[in-house]
Image: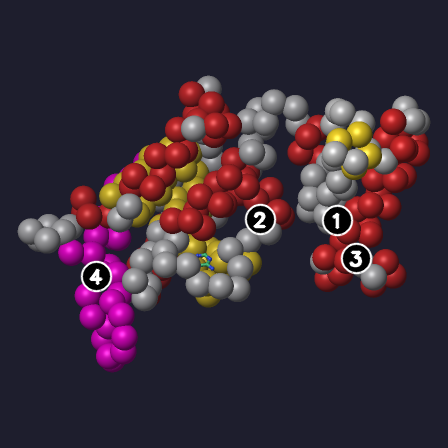
Amino acid sequence: MRVDIVTIFPSFFDVLDLSLLGKARAQGLFELGVHDLRDYTHDRHRTVDDTPYGGGAGMVMKPEPWGEALDVILADSPAVEEGNEPGAEQPLIIFPSPAGHVFTQATARRYANERHIVFGCGRYEGIDQRVFDYAATRARVELVSLGDYVLNGGEVAVMAMIEAFGRLIPGVVGNPLSLVEESHEDGLLEYPSYTKPAAWRGFEVPEVLLSGHHGKVAEWRKEQQIERTRRVRPDLLPEELR
Ligand code: ADE
């Protein structure tokens, strides 16, 4: 998979050299391009924003640098045929935005199967609407929100999304079974985990986990998942389990 990121803070993504995703990049499972939006400006101050038409507080990101950056990144992507909408053969461009659809584990699973994802990180009060309109003529476009709160820009949201789908790319996580038994994969929160020693500072590992009885362990874990989900996130449970 290839991922391109357009941002005014390229060094923000240096951390992608580390850890699981750094290793995945070294193995060629995941290719990354980080692009400084200011490289596509032509004035001395490398200006990327301007005041909003119609007035109002804050600044809006100008369309021209975005257009040039997207043209460079999409140069090798298949052209959209006359009269057609962009389809699966075109890249997916994601703009993180509190006005987007909420990102979930299902979104992460979908992104893990893409060939080419482009992230556009907005700052200030937003990006000129025509950037989205233009992008939609070249690729599939999605606005995606991390949740119902406002960040200063898209960078943190992009990091979170890359962490979430990157680990689902086949081969990135060493033991794929560890992906199966975690929160949200079966629609429930995960069960509590324990390792040695069996007793620590007066806290004991639940007896059933020491029993070696796989059936009972599985049953206990499922109960724990349901109990925890009911307590913390009842909205995730089907009606009859709430
Ligand atoms: N940019 C600003 N706030 C955001 C949010 N909640 N999710 C994604 N991108 C954002």
Q: Earlier in the sequence, mark 2 or mark 3?
A: 2
Up/down of 143 relative to 4, above or below: below
Check disc 2 and report the residue beneath it.
Answer: 107
Q: Does the magenta portion include 188?
A: no
Give residue 31's position: percent from left, percent from top.
40, 29
Give residue 175's position: percent from left, percent from top.
65, 24
Give residue 205's position: percent from left, percent from top.
82, 33
Label number found at residue 49 = 4
Up/down of 76 relative to 25, above or below: below
The three-letter amino acid code for the residue at tag 3 is: Arg
Looking at the rendered structure, the secondary structure element under dot 3 is: helix
Label 1 to label 3, Cα distance in Å? 9 Å
The three-letter amino acid code for the residue at tag 2 is: Thr
Looking at the rendered structure, the secondary structure element under dot 4 is: strand
Badge 1 local density, few (<14 within 10 Å), some, or many (20+)? many
Q: Nearer the viewer, mark 4 or mark 3?
A: 3
Along the viewing direction, whichever of 52 and 233 lies nearer the viewer: 233
Badge 2 local density, few (<14 within 10 Å), some, or many (20+)? some
Q: Do the residues bearing badges 2 and 4 touch, measured as CB atoms within 8 Å?
A: no
Check disc 3 and report the residue beneath it.
Answer: 230
The three-letter amino acid code for the residue at tag 4 is: Asp
